[in-house]
Amino acid sequence: MKHLTFTILLLVTSFCCAQTVADFEDFNIAVDSSNNNSGEQGYFVNGNVLLPNIFVDGDFSYWSGWAISSTTDTTTPGFTNDLSAITGGGAEGSTTYAVTYIFPSSIIRLTNDGIGGYVAGMYVTNNTYAYLSMLEGDGFAKKFGGETGNDPDFFKMTVKKFEEGALSTNSIDFYLADYRFEDNSQDYIVDEWTWLDLSSLGNADSLEITMSSSDNNDFGIKTPTYVCVDNITTANALTAIGDVDVPKVSIYPNPFENHIQIDTDAVIENVELVDVMGRTQAINLVGNVLYLDDVQSGVYFLRMEINRQLMVTKVIRR
């Protein structure tokens, strides 16, 4: 029987860290304005994240990567409104947020104390240009659902991590629009800020965002590949085991068949089991035994709050 003891594996598989939120409010951008030109430095920094930006000025100026915005326009269609969120403002009632144009990918680099830690998550919503394009169609992209409303369209962002120069095969998907339901009343295009939990990706140096859509041609995606994010929450990397009072915890068996025993002399405040796609699984915790009869075979992440500290470890269902 294999035990995992957190006092031994804490620096590898567990996180007990302070969190930092990149909320983009300290750029001092006036309401209904934006900044898609970071100048010669080529990036925006906020909290523990660095957002690369490219701006080329000329007869036809263009930008890519990231921009910072407080634009409130939710009604004007087309690419001239590419810096607006469909919510008309930032997450949780704030003013400012970040916008990214993804071609072919966008990067969120971790900086300062965030390097080598993990990203707990971020708020995500649609860009106004992309939202109205999917809702109504335009001269280039189709109306989602088609004329009958039955076309199984989708618009999806995928997040992966880089760690020590290697791109992980694990990913988390978030559907910004999904028309694949048999019941058309369930079809949706995201129009509010939605929390995307990224903690199951684990330690990272940066994140990569890519997009996919059901609406494509020979040159790629026809849906405007924009998305808005806010409150990117990072956990500062733990550099010394002595910095925190680490509770003694062990779990077994691992791999498991239908239950996991959690042995600790501390108080278990919360337990979650998350798959590699970031989906929370149904669990039944009785005392210190976690019953997982309905969980499919595969790799999962067990997240536990113990003595107000977050611990994460990988477990496997046979």
Image: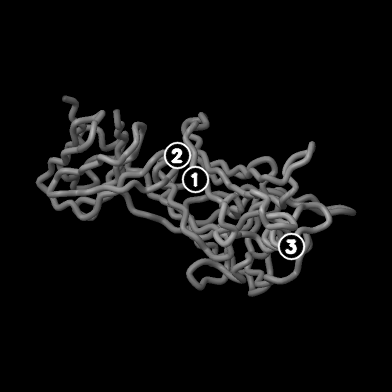
The disc labelled 3 sits on which kind of residue?
Answer: Glu
Query: Residue 294: where, in percent of width, then height?
Result: 29, 41
| The N terminus - image quarter | top left
- 280 vs 311, nearest the viewer: 280
- 160 vs 191, nearest the viewer: 191
Q: Which residue is mark 1?
A: 110
Decide if residue 41 is in sight here.
Answer: no
Please determine whether, in this image, residue 306 is positioned above or below residue 78.
above
Outermost residue toward the left in this view: 265
Name the secondary structure under disc 1.
strand
Query: Residue 157: where, in percent of width, then height?
Result: 58, 47
For the point 47% across and 31% down, the residue is 164
Name the secondary structure under disc 3.
helix
Outermost residue toward the top in this view: 1
Query: Residue 272: where, in percent of width, then height?
Result: 29, 48
Query: Residue 239: where, in percent of width, then height?
Result: 32, 40
Q: Quadrant of residue 144?
A: bottom right
Query: Disc 2 or 1, which lies upstream in sequence?
Result: 1
Q: Residues within 10 Å of mark 2 (few under 14, many from 20)?
A: many
Disc sitting over residue 136 in the figure? 3
Q: Nearer the viewer, mark 1 or mark 3?
A: 3
